[in-house]
Amino acid sequence: MSHARVTRALVAAASATALLTLAACSTAATPSASGPASGTTSAAVDDKCAAYKDYGDLKGKTISVFTSIASDSEAKPHTDSYKPFEECTGATIKYEGSRDFEAQLPVRLKAGNAPDIAYIPQPGLLATLVKDYPGKVFPAGDLATKNVETYYDPAWKTYGSVDGKFYAVPVGANVKSFVWYSPKAFADKGYQVPTTWDELIALSDKIVADNPDSDVKPWCAGIESGGATGWPATDWVEDVMLRVNGTDVYDQWVNHSIAFNDPKVVAAIDKVGTILKNDKYVNGGYGNVKTIATTSFTEAGNPILDGQCFMHRQASFYQANWPKGTKVGEDGDVWAFYFPSMSADSKPVLGGGEFAAAFSDRPEVQAFQAYLASPEWSNAKADATPNGGWLSANKKLDANKLVQPVDKLSYQILTDPKATFRFDGSDLMPGAVGAGSFWTGMTDWINGKSTQEVADAIEKSWPKK
């Protein structure tokens, strides 16, 4: 289970109670390059559906969508977000969710029973499907391509592409470059939010000095996640790789243009170790360094709430894990700041997301895939998720529709022109590494193995071409 799937499950849980009745063909945000037409003659409805005119009259057409979101309550924000498309085009969207999604999708492709659209949790899986099932995954149509090129950072098109051909449009996003903290605890101690790596380390040292005879530590962490144990530590490495080596080296590492045990990679892991393998810094509320391997990632940040630790590096989706009643916000019990880079002028952002791929090139399927890349869908999805926990990187998403403060902060970061976005590295690597040896290797590293030994083992596991 990759951490992209963990992300999806947490986001679904955060929005599981979402209830919304959309008005017929709700007013869209900024009209997109794609758009479907309504078969009605009402001037008011025609106006609301103007952004949909290019999709054509799709009355009587059915498009099937297959995702990993199985329960009715979790699926409701998705099905609600399709209503404007259905009501303005006349099409019917048939939604199906399965908790065995990733096992079932290849079976269905092989059997000739593919869905029209499927939500793919990571680019690595998309590449596998394209290569293992030639001709089964269809390139995105012109309208979908235009929408992604118009409304998304160019990186998102890259992550939906395989061998230079664009297949899948982005349908969800998250930011991983966050450090969670207590604003009140910082204010009480006079601590300032750090803006550079050196300031982050200086703050950690200050917290150590302020608590010489106690178990209070600057950091708390946990990487236990059942069969996916180790993934939170891979996020640490990816964030630090971006910061110490830059995007070009990061891309080379992810693509295996440089080896996993290259000195640059080893140096980045060692940089992570200055925090995660430092007994003076971790693991507040739980014990020593090795407790990180046995502390559940879902509970790892809780010591912030009782003053046992001050900082916890985790993604935007971690907001779903705070105990019930915890206020998240700048004046709340917990809040988050951007994980600092080496200098305040540099702003690399690590994140993840999901993509919608098509397994048919019928016009109605191409139209629906284009809709999923449009501002209309992003805004409808935000409306359909009133409890928050979902985010799009679409530049025309109305940020006021995002009800959770962390979602708004994430959107600001994702759309900041100074930010440089890179997708979660392990989700781009072959499954044997990204969802295998990288996870287990980082767990071994926390448990005492040397950086070089772990990096060598992961490099050895990389599939031969």
Image (cartoon, grey):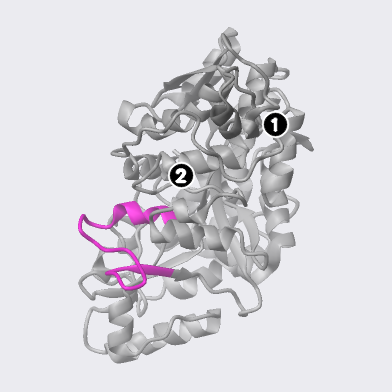
Task: Between residue 139 and residue 293, name the one nearer to us.
Answer: 139
Asked which quadrant contains residue 11, the reply is top left
Position of residue 401 relative to residue 42, above or below, is below
Could you say where residue 63 lies in the image, as x and y percent from the top left? 56, 17
Q: Which residues are magenta?
A: 315-336
What's the residue type where badge 1 is placed? Tyr
Q: Which label was assigned to residue 167?
A: 1
Q: Which label was assigned to residue 297?
A: none
Asked which quadrant contains residue 161, the reply is top right
Position of residue 30 relative to residue 248, above or below, is above
What's the residue type where badge 2 is placed? Ala
Q: Does residue 2 appear in this view?
A: no
Report how far apart the C-alphas of labels 1 and 2 lie in the structure: 24 Å
Q: Is residue 386 magenta?
A: no
Could you tell whether 50 is left or right of 310 in the image? right
Task: Between residue 31 and residue 247, name the one nearer to us.
Answer: 31
